[in-house]
């Protein structure tokens, strides 16, 4: 596979991941972190880092808007819930140094 095709496939998979996360707003970031070790904020940070590495001036909030599909503050107000005691305990168990 040539590099261009590989990059196109990776980009398509990333777009599909963002679509899936958008369809699953019920899954909270703490749940993602507990199970997979990364969340929407991690994805946005990686996106921002990749942009900066390529000389693109991109701030944290701009990168988050790419991942969340809207300004983070708006998404958070609409969809983020307070973490339950169970979620906090599961997170603490899975990430004791965090």
Image (cartoon, rainbow, N blue to C red):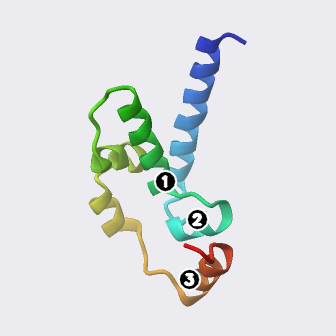
Image quadrant holding the N terminus, namely top right
Q: Is residue 96 above or below residue 76?
A: below
Answer few, some or many: residues within 10 Å of disc 1's Cα (few below 14, many 20 plus, some between 14 and 19).
some
**SS state under label 1:** helix
Q: Which quadrant holds residue 8?
A: top right
Image quadrant holding the C terminus, namely bottom right
The answer to which of marks 3 and 1 sits earlier in the sequence is 1
Residue 2 image point, x, y percent: 67, 10
**SS state under label 2:** helix
Residue contact at pointers 3 and 1, CB within 8 angstroms = no
For disc 3, the marked residue is 88
Residue 50 image point, x, y percent: 44, 34
Residue contact at pointers 1 and 2, CB within 8 angstroms = yes
Residue 33 image point, x, y percent: 58, 65
Q: Which quadrant holds residue 96?
A: bottom right
Q: Which quadrant holds residue 91?
A: bottom right
The answer to which of marks 1 and 2 sits earlier in the sequence is 2
Q: CA distance from mark 2 to mark 3?
A: 11 Å
For disc 1, the marked residue is 42
Q: Is residue 73 above or below residue 2?
A: below
Between 37 and 27, the one lying in front of the other is: 37
Q: Which residue does the image show at 62% across and 61% down from the upper left?
A: 37
The answer to which of marks 2 and 3 sits earlier in the sequence is 2
Answer few, some or many: residues within 10 Å of disc 3's Cα (few below 14, many 20 plus, some between 14 and 19).
some
């Amino acid at each position: 596979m040539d590099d261009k095709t590989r990059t196109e496939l990776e980009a398509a998979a990333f777009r599909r991941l963002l679509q899936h996360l958008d369809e699953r707003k019920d899954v909270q970031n703490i749940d993602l972190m507990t199970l997979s070790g990364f969340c929407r904020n991690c994805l946005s940070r990686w996106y921002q880092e990749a942009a900066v590495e390529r000389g693109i001036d991109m701030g944290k909030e701009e990168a988050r808007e790419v991942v969340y599909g809207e300004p983070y503050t708006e998404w958070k107000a609409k969809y983020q819930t307070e973490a339950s005691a169970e979620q906090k305990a599961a997170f603490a168990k899975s990430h004791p140094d965090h």
